[in-house]
Amino acid sequence: MATAKQVLILGGGFGGLVSANLIRKGLRKEECVITLVDKSRYFMMGLVNLWILSGNRKLEDSQVDLDNLQKKGIIFLNDEITSIDASEKSVTTRASNKLKCDYLIVALGAELAPERISGFENNDESCFNAYDSKQATRLREKILSIKRGRIVVCIADLPYKCPPAPYEVSLLLNDILVKNGTRDSIELDMYVPTPIALPVAGPQMSQNVVNLLNDNHIKFHTSHKIKKVLDKKTIEFENGNKTNYDVLVVIPPHQIPPVIKNSDLLEAEQRWINVDKFSLRTKHNNVFAIGDVTEIRLDKNTTIPKAGIFAEGEAKAVSFQIINEIKNSYLNYDKAHIQFDGKGHCFMEIGDKKAGYIDADFYNEAGPTTRLVAPSEEFYQKKLDFEKSRVNEWLTP
Ligand SMILES: Cc1cc2nc3c(=O)[nH]c(=O)nc-3n(C[C@H](O)[C@H](O)[C@H](O)COP(=O)(O)OP(=O)(O)OC[C@H]3O[C@@H](n4cnc5c(N)ncnc54)[C@H](O)[C@@H]3O)c2cc1C
């Protein structure tokens, strides 16, 4: 009998967990050994940050132990990947493990880089990174403590994870202030570097989002890219404008993890990994990249958004290809399964336990389509189910 193939998955986030589970379901242990490596011991969905901010969740109740994978027949290595040689399908870790494989799936996500904003990290207790789960509780406490002043939410740069999320942050901050009885004495402004709210979703969807901000008296400023944070609670933008804040909430710049930057997965000048838009194959044989580490260009200005739902769709396509190949049966999963379809959906929270529903079809032949369905309590419930059902499926033994 042939020896089991080795599948190595780098990253136990959205994409890595979908791949590990699907491949395990599709192949017996004698057919394939799956090893997943992550430097974090826990998984938590990014959207939970918003629930911590709203006061509906606690960080410590939301992190699920990746060690649960072991009980599902997936080897979990809690270790930091320090080098990748994609041409050799080999990886080295901090603890000096050298791992070689037949199939490599790179799902290491995007890193937050607040230090790239001059003056931001050294600032005082009034600056927050909206995407850092460890800061969400502190941000909530700060918002509850202020009685008057000005809160500024700022998207530093593109691309960033989950395009609607910064708008959710603004709407949830508004909701906290309303419930706290302080909204009338606190200004809330949002600054973005782009000429419209959601370039990837087009002008109509952008206007729908701006209408939600307007309905809640959140002032919206386009084409303002942050240059630096000055002392005396002032931000300077690249267009020369300045603005004051009492609390600054930033969606920081994102970057590829350095271990990929230093590998043969990137060409010079490339910021993210190039893959085939259907198969997610890199230029290296049997090496795939999925999720936020990739750049799938739709046109000159837009790429597939960095979001868990797309990491999931890409992971499915990759897993079914690998299962087909290892089973040596191209009839097992058909084209609809092995090709990423560019479709996704999400739930956009507006506060008061309501959410809108967004869906998108980026590979639509007549051009990408996006749609926003009006917020309701039902969609908020569906968002709760979205997280719960996936975490159960991926990490409950
Ligand atoms: C506030 C917020 C709200 C969001 N809301 C949504 C939403 O509603 N819907 C949606 O679809 N998406 C949402 N997202 C985006 C979503 O979380 C990401 O797009 C998704 O997690 C990307 O999946 P991934 O597998 O590419 O990477 P990740 O899930 O980020 O996983 C990457 C993993 O790699 C590990 N890693 C990185 N470097 C190393 C290394 N050197 N060694 C070992 N391990 C390493 C990390 O620890 C991490 O576990 C949201 C994100 C945020 C921040």
Image: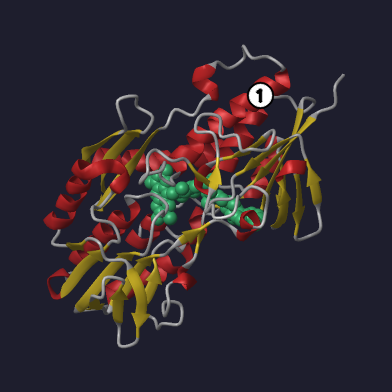
Q: Quadrant of residue 195?
A: bottom left
| Residue located at (50% from left, 40% from top) | 311
Position of residue 298 in the picture relative to residue 275 (left or right): left
* Quadrant (top left/top right/bottom left/bottom right) for the C terminus: top right
In the picture, measured across the screen, residue 178 lies left or right of residue 224, that is: left
In the rendered image, is residue 269 in sight? yes
Secondary element under disc 1, as helix, strand or loop, is helix
Quarter of the image with the N terminus in it: top right
Q: In the image as oriented, which residue stretches furthest toward the right?
A: 1
**Does the numbered disc 1 mark a residue whose Cβ is under 8 Å from ligand 1?**
no
Badge 1: few (under 14), some or many (20 or more) residues near its Cα, within 10 Å?
Answer: many
Left or right, 20 with respect to 161, comes to right
Give the x, y percent position of residue 279. Answer: 56, 29
- Return the residue nearer the eye: 195 or 66: 195
Compared to residue 318, the image places residue 259 above or below, namely: below
Quadrant for residue 322, please give it. top right
Residue found at x 63% / y 54%: 260
Residue named by callout 1: 323
- Residue 393 vs 114, above or below: the answer is above
The location of residue 345, given as percent across then percent down, is: 36, 36
| Residue at (32% x, 41% y) in the render | 381
**Where does the image place residue 228, in percent across and percent down from the top left?**
37, 77
**Against 13, is 339 above or below?**
above
Taking depth in this image into account, of 150 and 341 the one nearest to the observer is 341
Question: For the residue marked with disc 1, what is the amino acid?
Answer: Ile
Residue 130, percent across and down? 39, 64
Give the total of numbered labels. Answer: 1
Q: Quadrant of residue 382?
A: top left
Q: Is residue 48 visible?
A: no
Q: Check the image and name the residue furthest to the top.
A: 331
Q: Residue furthest bottom?
A: 232
